[in-house]
Image (cartoon, rainbow, N blue to C red):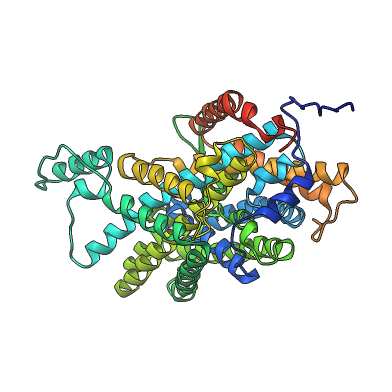
Amino acid sequence: METKIKQVDTSVWRKKPLAAYEADMKKSELKRVLSRWGLTSLGIGAVIGGGIFVLTGIAAHDWAGPALAVAFIIAGIACTFAALCYAEFASILPVEGSAYAYSYGTVGEIFAWFIGWNLILEYMMGATTVAVSWSGYFEKLLHLFGIDPPLWLMNDPVTAQEKAEKLRAAGEVIPDFTFAVNLPAFLIVWVVTYILVKGIKEAASTNNLIVIVKVATVIFVIIAGAFFVDVANWTPFIPDPVVDDSGQTHYGFDGIVTAAGIVFFAYIGFDAVSTQAGEAINPRKDVPFAIIASLLICTLLYILVSLVLTGMVNYKDLDLKAPVAQAFADAGLTWAVYLITIAAIAGLTSVMLVMMLGQTRIFLGMAKDGLLPKNLFASIHPTFKTPWKSTIFVGAIVSVVAALTPIDKVSELCSSGTLLAFAMICAAVWILRVREPNLERPYRTPALPVIATLGILANLYLMYNLRTDTKITFVIWGTLGLIVYFLYGRRHSNLNNPSE
């Protein structure tokens, strides 16, 4: 009898069959324990953190002025377009892997790989940035209680030397040191790693508690801060444009758009909800709901906080490291500084938790498809039912980088990868609607051609307005990703083996 040999598709645009996703869902060893509001809480936990407590000062002081609220609206609109497209994909393919998985089944392997590679910038490097911010707020909390740890234990080597030189120039006696490490950043990453290895239920419970604390604090900031708003600080609401020596425009409309690209980092995380589809109880309905609900809730809170913050303090006087806490200190509400600092520490912890959680699930999806080593990234713990090796691997890299590397402008690099991924997802969901019009879609993006087009244009426009060196670094990162794909991913892909 003649045996038919199935021909292997060697094209870089080959697609993972949708039937294979159904098989993956049935074989999944992950626990389905997340409810609709549990998923929404994860989304809020990922979004509210470093952006609102840190980046607001930089964005308003250097770029947007009082029009920071407008920058948040622009960034929120760009995210909303992407969120609506994510929601449709999540209802069709409720699997871990997020944008990577969605594009693999619709556009092609190299497109999916490029998205997955860029999401490393969003999740792993984002977690690194947040770990360093966490350390900064933790140090501030220690100072509030009169504890002054040595510079070499609280900062990476470069930052520690820079701070020491400034303090010596100011007349302070700072002992020489030959070694420095950001110990708090290192340790908090391993605390989060331990929680993630233990299980998604424990991680979700921890996150829910933190979300309650920080959302309550954000509402407190809005209500209490409103009593200290001086409307004169909002005039002019959009400062006149200023061009610096490098040709970059600050303030005016161009400055607001640049600020939108910077505060976009504050929105990164709502898409992390889609990485948890493999652990959702009813993913087809609850994941789309959680994506949109978490984004809308956070956007409203961001707009209100930015209006209060720029109303309490003139944008030129905003503190760049801890703008919210410093605004209340300047208003004489010293007790509130304790509350805000503790909430910021808690908030940043939950952002780290969800970012590292999302990264391991994307790695899991890519490893299941053969694009990454399965024995490392797809190994599920027999008791905890979590990708434990991948979680420890991510924790090791994030902790070491956070402990030893000065993190400057990394938020923009994170944003660049996410902006491109969002634009690509808007295109991919449109392509799938055309190619597979009869596919079951529990959630359908309204007016998809309009939403997808606006999503593509808005996200690419924000990416275009990022700083030049950020774009250069992004191109280098993308080139490295393509090299890895052609050296490993393409050859080891399951699609090279028809039996997979």
**Observer-nearest of 468 and 92:** 92
Residue 247 point in image, percent of width and height: 50, 30
Residue occupying image coordinates x 60% and y 67%: 34
Residue occupying image coordinates x 77% and y 54%: 92
Residue 100 point in image, percent of width and height: 65, 43
Q: Residue farthest to the front?
A: 1
How many labels, in total? 0
**Observer-nearest of 109 and 169:** 109
202 is higher (above) or lower (below) than 382:
below
Residue 228 point in image, percent of width and height: 42, 72
Residue occupying image coordinates x 58% and y 52%: 71
- Asked which quadrant contains residue 291, the reply is bottom right
Q: Quick check: can you spot residue 414?
A: no
Q: Quick check: can you spot residue 448?
A: yes
Seen in the image, is 366 located left or right of residue 242? right
Q: Quadrant of the N terminus?
A: top right
- Asked which quadrant contains residue 72, the reply is bottom right
494 is higher (above) or lower (below) than 480:
below
**Observer-nearest of 297 and 19:** 19
**Observer-nearest of 385 and 52:** 385
149 is higher (above) or lower (below) than 455:
below
Q: Quadrant of the C terminus?
A: top right
Residue 254 point in image, percent of width and height: 58, 41
Seen in the image, is 69 located left or right of residue 311? right
Residue occupying image coordinates x 78% and y 41%: 17
